[in-house]
Amino acid sequence: MKMNNSLNDNILVYYFSIVLLTLSLSLPHAVLTVLLLDKGLTLSQILMIQTSFSIAILIFEYPSGILADFLSRKAIFLIGKSLLILTFLSIIYFNNFWIIFIGWFLYGVSTALTDGSLDAELINDIKINDQDKLNKFVSRSHQLTFISLIVGSSLGSILYSKMDVYFYFISIFFVVMTLLFVQLFFKNLGASSQIQHKIDFKLIKNQIIHGFQEINNSIYIKLIIILTILSQFFFQTHFQLWQAFLLNRSINPEHFFIFYIIFQLIGMFVYNISLDNIKLKISKLLIITISLVATTLPILIVFGNTFLSILIYMIFVSLFTFIGYLCTYIFSKQVSKERISSLTSFKATCARIGAILSLLFGSLLLRFFGVEYVIIINFIISIVSSLIVIFVFLKVNSSKNRH
Protein backbone atom coordinates (compact mmCIF):
# COMPACT_ATOMS: atom_id res chain seq x y z
CA MET A 1 0.00 0.00 0.00
CA LYS A 2 2.85 2.37 0.91
CA MET A 3 4.52 1.70 -2.46
CA ASN A 4 1.28 2.40 -4.33
CA ASN A 5 0.79 5.64 -2.42
CA SER A 6 4.35 6.74 -3.24
CA LEU A 7 3.82 5.82 -6.89
CA ASN A 8 0.63 7.87 -7.01
CA ASP A 9 2.48 10.79 -5.43
CA ASN A 10 5.25 10.55 -8.04
CA ILE A 11 2.69 10.44 -10.84
CA LEU A 12 1.09 13.62 -9.52
CA VAL A 13 4.51 15.30 -9.31
CA TYR A 14 5.19 14.24 -12.90
CA TYR A 15 1.82 15.60 -14.06
CA PHE A 16 2.57 18.89 -12.34
CA SER A 17 5.98 19.07 -14.00
CA ILE A 18 4.38 18.41 -17.40
CA VAL A 19 2.04 21.35 -16.94
CA LEU A 20 4.77 23.80 -15.85
CA LEU A 21 7.32 22.74 -18.47
CA THR A 22 4.79 22.72 -21.29
CA LEU A 23 3.63 26.19 -20.28
CA SER A 24 7.23 27.41 -20.29
CA LEU A 25 7.91 25.99 -23.76
CA SER A 26 4.58 26.85 -25.37
CA LEU A 27 4.42 30.56 -24.46
CA PRO A 28 6.19 31.51 -27.74
CA HIS A 29 4.67 28.77 -29.95
CA ALA A 30 2.05 30.89 -31.69
CA VAL A 31 4.45 33.82 -32.22
CA LEU A 32 7.87 32.17 -32.50
CA THR A 33 8.38 32.80 -36.22
CA VAL A 34 7.35 36.44 -35.80
CA LEU A 35 9.61 36.78 -32.74
CA LEU A 36 12.67 35.42 -34.54
CA LEU A 37 11.98 37.51 -37.63
CA ASP A 38 11.77 40.58 -35.40
CA LYS A 39 15.23 39.69 -34.10
CA GLY A 40 16.53 40.01 -37.65
CA LEU A 41 16.72 36.34 -38.58
CA THR A 42 15.68 35.12 -42.01
CA LEU A 43 13.38 32.17 -42.69
CA SER A 44 16.39 30.21 -43.90
CA GLN A 45 18.21 30.90 -40.62
CA ILE A 46 15.13 29.89 -38.63
CA LEU A 47 15.11 26.52 -40.41
CA MET A 48 18.81 26.11 -39.62
CA ILE A 49 18.09 26.81 -35.96
CA GLN A 50 15.40 24.13 -35.97
CA THR A 51 17.88 21.74 -37.57
CA SER A 52 20.38 22.41 -34.75
CA PHE A 53 17.73 21.18 -32.31
CA SER A 54 17.35 17.90 -34.21
CA ILE A 55 21.11 17.44 -34.56
CA ALA A 56 21.59 17.88 -30.80
CA ILE A 57 18.96 15.24 -30.10
CA LEU A 58 20.51 12.93 -32.69
CA ILE A 59 23.91 13.21 -30.97
CA PHE A 60 22.84 13.03 -27.33
CA GLU A 61 19.56 11.09 -27.23
CA TYR A 62 20.76 7.50 -27.23
CA PRO A 63 23.86 8.04 -24.99
CA SER A 64 21.73 9.86 -22.44
CA GLY A 65 19.18 7.05 -22.49
CA ILE A 66 21.89 4.47 -21.82
CA LEU A 67 23.20 6.52 -18.88
CA ALA A 68 19.65 6.90 -17.55
CA ASP A 69 19.45 3.10 -17.24
CA PHE A 70 22.46 3.23 -14.87
CA LEU A 71 22.29 6.62 -13.17
CA SER A 72 19.49 8.49 -11.44
CA ARG A 73 16.80 9.41 -13.96
CA LYS A 74 15.70 12.16 -11.60
CA ALA A 75 19.19 13.72 -11.63
CA ILE A 76 19.39 13.53 -15.43
CA PHE A 77 15.96 15.17 -15.67
CA LEU A 78 17.05 18.04 -13.40
CA ILE A 79 20.29 18.62 -15.31
CA GLY A 80 18.52 18.50 -18.68
CA LYS A 81 15.77 20.93 -17.78
CA SER A 82 18.30 23.36 -16.29
CA LEU A 83 19.71 23.83 -19.79
CA LEU A 84 16.39 25.33 -20.87
CA ILE A 85 17.22 28.42 -18.82
CA LEU A 86 20.31 29.02 -20.99
CA THR A 87 18.20 28.66 -24.13
CA PHE A 88 15.67 31.22 -22.92
CA LEU A 89 18.41 33.67 -21.88
CA SER A 90 20.03 33.43 -25.33
CA ILE A 91 16.73 34.51 -26.90
CA ILE A 92 16.10 37.30 -24.41
CA TYR A 93 19.49 39.00 -24.58
CA PHE A 94 20.92 38.26 -28.02
CA ASN A 95 20.00 38.90 -31.67
CA ASN A 96 23.07 37.12 -33.05
CA PHE A 97 22.23 34.09 -35.20
CA TRP A 98 25.05 31.91 -33.88
CA ILE A 99 24.29 32.56 -30.22
CA ILE A 100 20.63 31.70 -30.75
CA PHE A 101 21.76 28.68 -32.80
CA ILE A 102 23.82 27.47 -29.81
CA GLY A 103 20.90 28.22 -27.49
CA TRP A 104 18.62 26.08 -29.63
CA PHE A 105 21.26 23.35 -29.71
CA LEU A 106 21.19 23.36 -25.88
CA TYR A 107 17.40 23.08 -26.09
CA GLY A 108 17.94 19.90 -28.12
CA VAL A 109 20.46 18.59 -25.56
CA SER A 110 17.91 19.30 -22.81
CA THR A 111 15.23 17.36 -24.66
CA ALA A 112 17.63 14.48 -25.34
CA LEU A 113 18.64 14.20 -21.69
CA THR A 114 15.09 14.21 -20.35
CA ASP A 115 13.40 11.87 -22.86
CA GLY A 116 13.13 8.53 -21.13
CA SER A 117 13.90 9.93 -17.68
CA LEU A 118 11.02 10.51 -15.24
CA ASP A 119 8.47 9.09 -17.69
CA ALA A 120 10.50 5.87 -18.07
CA GLU A 121 10.92 5.70 -14.28
CA LEU A 122 7.17 5.86 -13.79
CA ILE A 123 6.38 3.40 -16.60
CA ASN A 124 8.69 0.87 -14.94
CA ASP A 125 7.09 1.43 -11.53
CA ILE A 126 3.60 1.15 -13.01
CA LYS A 127 4.53 -2.13 -14.74
CA ILE A 128 5.73 -3.52 -11.41
CA ASN A 129 2.83 -2.31 -9.26
CA ASP A 130 -0.25 -1.91 -11.46
CA GLN A 131 0.01 -2.73 -15.19
CA ASP A 132 -3.60 -1.62 -15.77
CA LYS A 133 -2.63 1.99 -15.02
CA LEU A 134 -0.28 2.22 -18.00
CA ASN A 135 -2.85 3.22 -20.62
CA LYS A 136 -4.33 5.82 -18.26
CA PHE A 137 -0.86 7.22 -17.48
CA VAL A 138 0.14 7.58 -21.16
CA SER A 139 -3.23 9.05 -22.10
CA ARG A 140 -3.46 11.52 -19.21
CA SER A 141 0.14 12.68 -19.67
CA HIS A 142 -0.58 13.67 -23.26
CA GLN A 143 -3.94 15.22 -22.37
CA LEU A 144 -2.25 17.46 -19.81
CA THR A 145 0.36 18.37 -22.40
CA PHE A 146 -2.30 19.39 -24.91
CA ILE A 147 -4.24 21.44 -22.34
CA SER A 148 -1.04 23.20 -21.27
CA LEU A 149 -0.12 23.88 -24.89
CA ILE A 150 -3.47 25.56 -25.44
CA VAL A 151 -3.17 27.70 -22.31
CA GLY A 152 0.50 28.50 -22.89
CA SER A 153 0.21 29.47 -26.55
CA SER A 154 -2.87 31.62 -25.92
CA LEU A 155 -1.23 33.32 -22.95
CA GLY A 156 1.98 33.79 -24.93
CA SER A 157 0.17 35.56 -27.76
CA ILE A 158 -1.16 38.10 -25.27
CA LEU A 159 2.07 38.46 -23.30
CA TYR A 160 4.23 38.97 -26.38
CA SER A 161 2.18 42.00 -27.39
CA LYS A 162 2.65 43.43 -23.88
CA MET A 163 6.15 42.31 -22.88
CA ASP A 164 7.90 41.55 -26.17
CA VAL A 165 10.69 38.95 -25.81
CA TYR A 166 10.84 39.44 -22.04
CA PHE A 167 7.88 37.11 -21.59
CA TYR A 168 10.59 34.41 -21.63
CA PHE A 169 11.31 35.37 -18.01
CA ILE A 170 7.96 33.77 -17.19
CA SER A 171 9.16 30.63 -18.97
CA ILE A 172 12.30 30.67 -16.81
CA PHE A 173 10.13 30.99 -13.68
CA PHE A 174 8.10 27.91 -14.70
CA VAL A 175 11.30 25.91 -15.28
CA VAL A 176 12.75 26.87 -11.89
CA MET A 177 9.48 25.91 -10.18
CA THR A 178 9.59 22.53 -11.92
CA LEU A 179 13.17 21.87 -10.84
CA LEU A 180 12.38 22.69 -7.21
CA PHE A 181 9.17 20.67 -7.17
CA VAL A 182 10.76 17.54 -8.69
CA GLN A 183 13.82 17.80 -6.45
CA LEU A 184 11.71 18.06 -3.30
CA PHE A 185 8.82 15.69 -3.98
CA PHE A 186 9.77 13.05 -6.59
CA LYS A 187 10.98 9.95 -4.74
CA ASN A 188 13.06 7.03 -6.04
CA LEU A 189 10.99 3.85 -5.73
CA GLY A 190 11.53 0.15 -6.33
CA ALA A 191 12.29 0.24 -10.05
CA SER A 192 15.06 2.76 -9.52
CA SER A 193 16.60 1.15 -6.47
CA GLN A 194 18.76 -1.12 -8.64
CA ILE A 195 20.41 1.81 -10.44
CA GLN A 196 24.19 1.66 -10.57
CA HIS A 197 25.73 4.91 -9.39
CA LYS A 198 29.22 4.00 -10.67
CA ILE A 199 29.49 3.96 -14.44
CA ASP A 200 30.76 0.57 -15.63
CA PHE A 201 31.62 0.73 -19.33
CA LYS A 202 31.37 -3.04 -19.63
CA LEU A 203 27.80 -2.85 -18.35
CA ILE A 204 27.09 0.00 -20.76
CA LYS A 205 28.45 -2.11 -23.64
CA ASN A 206 26.25 -5.03 -22.57
CA GLN A 207 23.28 -2.67 -22.28
CA ILE A 208 23.78 -1.53 -25.87
CA ILE A 209 24.17 -5.11 -27.16
CA HIS A 210 21.14 -6.37 -25.25
CA GLY A 211 19.13 -3.35 -26.36
CA PHE A 212 19.73 -4.11 -30.02
CA GLN A 213 19.00 -7.77 -29.37
CA GLU A 214 15.68 -6.77 -27.82
CA ILE A 215 14.85 -4.71 -30.91
CA ASN A 216 15.89 -7.56 -33.20
CA ASN A 217 13.77 -10.07 -31.28
CA SER A 218 10.62 -7.92 -31.23
CA ILE A 219 8.81 -7.32 -34.51
CA TYR A 220 6.55 -4.88 -32.67
CA ILE A 221 9.38 -2.64 -31.51
CA LYS A 222 11.00 -2.71 -34.96
CA LEU A 223 7.74 -1.75 -36.66
CA ILE A 224 7.04 1.04 -34.16
CA ILE A 225 10.53 2.50 -34.68
CA ILE A 226 10.09 2.39 -38.47
CA LEU A 227 6.65 3.97 -38.19
CA THR A 228 8.07 6.69 -35.94
CA ILE A 229 10.70 7.56 -38.56
CA LEU A 230 8.23 7.64 -41.44
CA SER A 231 5.70 9.76 -39.55
CA GLN A 232 8.30 12.53 -39.28
CA PHE A 233 7.69 13.38 -42.94
CA PHE A 234 4.23 14.45 -41.82
CA PHE A 235 5.02 15.94 -38.42
CA GLN A 236 8.01 18.06 -39.47
CA THR A 237 6.15 19.32 -42.53
CA HIS A 238 3.20 20.19 -40.33
CA PHE A 239 5.28 21.84 -37.58
CA GLN A 240 7.34 23.95 -39.97
CA LEU A 241 4.84 24.82 -42.71
CA TRP A 242 1.37 25.06 -41.17
CA GLN A 243 1.69 28.83 -40.79
CA ALA A 244 2.91 29.17 -44.39
CA PHE A 245 -0.03 27.02 -45.51
CA LEU A 246 -2.48 29.34 -43.74
CA LEU A 247 -0.77 32.43 -45.18
CA ASN A 248 -1.17 30.86 -48.62
CA ARG A 249 -4.86 30.56 -47.84
CA SER A 250 -5.00 34.28 -46.90
CA ILE A 251 -5.59 33.64 -43.20
CA ASN A 252 -4.74 36.61 -40.97
CA PRO A 253 -1.67 35.81 -38.79
CA GLU A 254 -3.51 37.27 -35.81
CA HIS A 255 -5.81 34.23 -36.00
CA PHE A 256 -3.03 31.64 -36.05
CA PHE A 257 -3.33 30.95 -32.34
CA ILE A 258 -6.90 29.75 -32.95
CA PHE A 259 -5.62 27.07 -35.33
CA TYR A 260 -2.90 26.17 -32.84
CA ILE A 261 -5.60 25.63 -30.22
CA ILE A 262 -7.58 23.47 -32.66
CA PHE A 263 -4.50 21.30 -33.22
CA GLN A 264 -4.19 20.74 -29.47
CA LEU A 265 -7.91 19.99 -29.10
CA ILE A 266 -7.53 17.35 -31.79
CA GLY A 267 -4.69 15.86 -29.77
CA MET A 268 -6.75 15.85 -26.58
CA PHE A 269 -9.58 14.04 -28.36
CA VAL A 270 -7.29 11.45 -29.94
CA TYR A 271 -5.46 10.70 -26.69
CA ASN A 272 -8.79 10.09 -25.01
CA ILE A 273 -9.46 7.10 -27.29
CA SER A 274 -9.21 3.76 -25.51
CA LEU A 275 -6.65 1.37 -26.94
CA ASP A 276 -7.99 -1.73 -25.21
CA ASN A 277 -8.77 -3.32 -28.56
CA ILE A 278 -5.75 -2.30 -30.62
CA LYS A 279 -6.45 -4.53 -33.60
CA LEU A 280 -9.93 -3.08 -34.08
CA LYS A 281 -8.58 0.45 -33.90
CA ILE A 282 -5.86 -0.28 -36.47
CA SER A 283 -8.33 -1.89 -38.84
CA LYS A 284 -10.50 1.20 -38.72
CA LEU A 285 -7.41 3.34 -39.13
CA LEU A 286 -6.50 1.50 -42.34
CA ILE A 287 -9.94 2.13 -43.80
CA ILE A 288 -9.69 5.84 -42.96
CA THR A 289 -6.17 6.06 -44.36
CA ILE A 290 -7.07 4.41 -47.67
CA SER A 291 -10.09 6.67 -48.01
CA LEU A 292 -8.00 9.77 -47.34
CA VAL A 293 -5.34 8.81 -49.87
CA ALA A 294 -7.94 7.98 -52.52
CA THR A 295 -10.18 11.01 -52.17
CA THR A 296 -8.86 13.93 -50.16
CA LEU A 297 -5.34 14.49 -51.48
CA PRO A 298 -6.49 15.21 -55.07
CA ILE A 299 -9.15 17.56 -53.69
CA LEU A 300 -6.56 19.43 -51.63
CA ILE A 301 -4.29 19.87 -54.66
CA VAL A 302 -6.90 20.69 -57.30
CA PHE A 303 -9.51 22.80 -55.54
CA GLY A 304 -8.86 26.23 -54.08
CA ASN A 305 -11.64 26.23 -51.50
CA THR A 306 -10.03 27.40 -48.26
CA PHE A 307 -12.51 25.76 -45.90
CA LEU A 308 -12.24 22.36 -47.58
CA SER A 309 -8.44 22.47 -47.70
CA ILE A 310 -8.16 23.38 -44.02
CA LEU A 311 -10.70 20.71 -43.07
CA ILE A 312 -8.71 18.03 -44.91
CA TYR A 313 -5.53 19.32 -43.28
CA MET A 314 -7.14 18.88 -39.86
CA ILE A 315 -8.11 15.31 -40.75
CA PHE A 316 -4.48 14.53 -41.51
CA VAL A 317 -3.44 16.05 -38.19
CA SER A 318 -5.97 13.81 -36.43
CA LEU A 319 -4.80 10.73 -38.30
CA PHE A 320 -1.11 11.13 -37.56
CA THR A 321 -1.74 12.20 -33.97
CA PHE A 322 -3.51 8.87 -33.53
CA ILE A 323 -0.58 7.03 -35.13
CA GLY A 324 1.78 8.77 -32.70
CA TYR A 325 -0.46 7.81 -29.76
CA LEU A 326 -0.59 4.21 -30.96
CA CYS A 327 3.19 4.04 -31.30
CA THR A 328 3.74 5.41 -27.79
CA TYR A 329 1.28 2.98 -26.24
CA ILE A 330 2.49 -0.16 -28.03
CA PHE A 331 6.14 0.72 -27.40
CA SER A 332 5.45 1.25 -23.68
CA LYS A 333 3.77 -2.16 -23.52
CA GLN A 334 6.49 -4.03 -25.40
CA VAL A 335 9.78 -2.56 -24.14
CA SER A 336 11.50 -4.20 -21.16
CA LYS A 337 11.86 -2.28 -17.90
CA GLU A 338 15.63 -2.97 -17.84
CA ARG A 339 16.25 -1.07 -21.08
CA ILE A 340 13.29 1.29 -21.28
CA SER A 341 15.37 4.49 -21.09
CA SER A 342 17.98 3.45 -23.66
CA LEU A 343 15.41 2.06 -26.11
CA THR A 344 13.10 5.06 -25.65
CA SER A 345 16.07 7.27 -26.44
CA PHE A 346 17.02 5.09 -29.41
CA LYS A 347 13.49 5.43 -30.78
CA ALA A 348 13.67 9.20 -30.33
CA THR A 349 17.07 9.23 -32.07
CA CYS A 350 15.55 7.39 -35.02
CA ALA A 351 12.74 9.94 -35.05
CA ARG A 352 15.33 12.72 -35.24
CA ILE A 353 16.99 11.03 -38.21
CA GLY A 354 13.59 11.02 -39.89
CA ALA A 355 13.09 14.67 -38.88
CA ILE A 356 16.41 15.79 -40.35
CA LEU A 357 15.79 13.87 -43.58
CA SER A 358 12.30 15.32 -43.93
CA LEU A 359 13.52 18.87 -43.21
CA LEU A 360 16.31 18.58 -45.78
CA PHE A 361 13.94 17.03 -48.31
CA GLY A 362 11.34 19.73 -47.67
CA SER A 363 13.94 22.48 -48.06
CA LEU A 364 14.95 21.01 -51.42
CA LEU A 365 11.35 20.74 -52.60
CA LEU A 366 10.64 24.36 -51.67
CA ARG A 367 13.17 25.43 -54.32
CA PHE A 368 10.96 23.96 -57.03
CA PHE A 369 7.39 23.82 -55.67
CA GLY A 370 4.95 25.95 -53.72
CA VAL A 371 4.17 25.35 -50.06
CA GLU A 372 0.98 23.36 -50.66
CA TYR A 373 2.63 20.97 -53.10
CA VAL A 374 5.51 20.38 -50.69
CA ILE A 375 2.97 19.60 -47.97
CA ILE A 376 1.13 17.16 -50.23
CA ILE A 377 4.30 15.36 -51.34
CA ASN A 378 5.47 14.83 -47.77
CA PHE A 379 2.00 13.81 -46.61
CA ILE A 380 1.80 11.20 -49.37
CA ILE A 381 5.21 9.80 -48.41
CA SER A 382 4.14 9.50 -44.78
CA ILE A 383 0.73 8.02 -45.52
CA VAL A 384 1.76 5.41 -48.08
CA SER A 385 4.87 4.25 -46.22
CA SER A 386 3.05 4.19 -42.85
CA LEU A 387 0.22 2.23 -44.43
CA ILE A 388 2.68 -0.44 -45.57
CA VAL A 389 4.18 -0.68 -42.08
CA ILE A 390 0.75 -0.95 -40.45
CA PHE A 391 -0.22 -3.75 -42.85
CA VAL A 392 2.91 -5.60 -41.75
CA PHE A 393 1.96 -5.06 -38.13
CA LEU A 394 -1.52 -6.44 -38.77
CA LYS A 395 -0.08 -9.47 -40.51
CA VAL A 396 2.32 -10.18 -37.64
CA ASN A 397 -0.39 -9.63 -35.05
CA SER A 398 -2.78 -11.95 -36.89
CA SER A 399 -0.10 -14.63 -37.28
CA LYS A 400 0.73 -14.42 -33.58
CA ASN A 401 -2.92 -14.81 -32.61
CA ARG A 402 -3.27 -17.91 -34.79
CA HIS A 403 -0.34 -19.57 -33.07
Image (cartoon, helix red, strand yellow):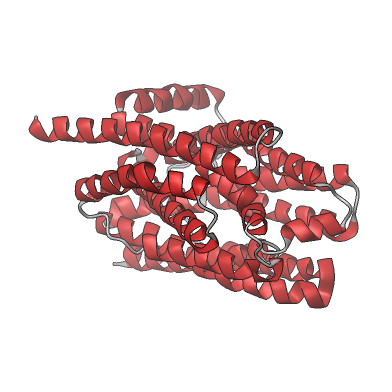
Residue closest to the eye, 156 or 188: 156
**Horizontal and vertical percent for residue 385?**
40, 32
| Whether residue 307 is situated above or below residue 302 in the rendered picture | below
Q: Quadrant of the N terminus?
A: bottom left
**Horizontal and vertical percent for residue 82?**
70, 55
Is residue 89 visible to the viewer in this orientation of the structure?
no
Residue ID at (81%, 78%): 162
Residue ID at (79%, 48%): 103
Residue ranking furthest to the front: 303
Residue ID at (50%, 46%): 302
**Horizontal and vertical percent for residue 286?**
28, 43
Q: Is residue 21 left or right of residue 378?
A: right
- Quarter occupied by residue 131: bottom left
| Whether residue 147 is situated above or below residue 200 in the rendered picture | below
Q: Is residue 168 left or right of residue 224?
A: right
Is residue 286 visible to the viewer in this orientation of the structure?
yes
- Quarter occupied by residue 400: top left
Residue closest to the eye, 47 or 78: 47
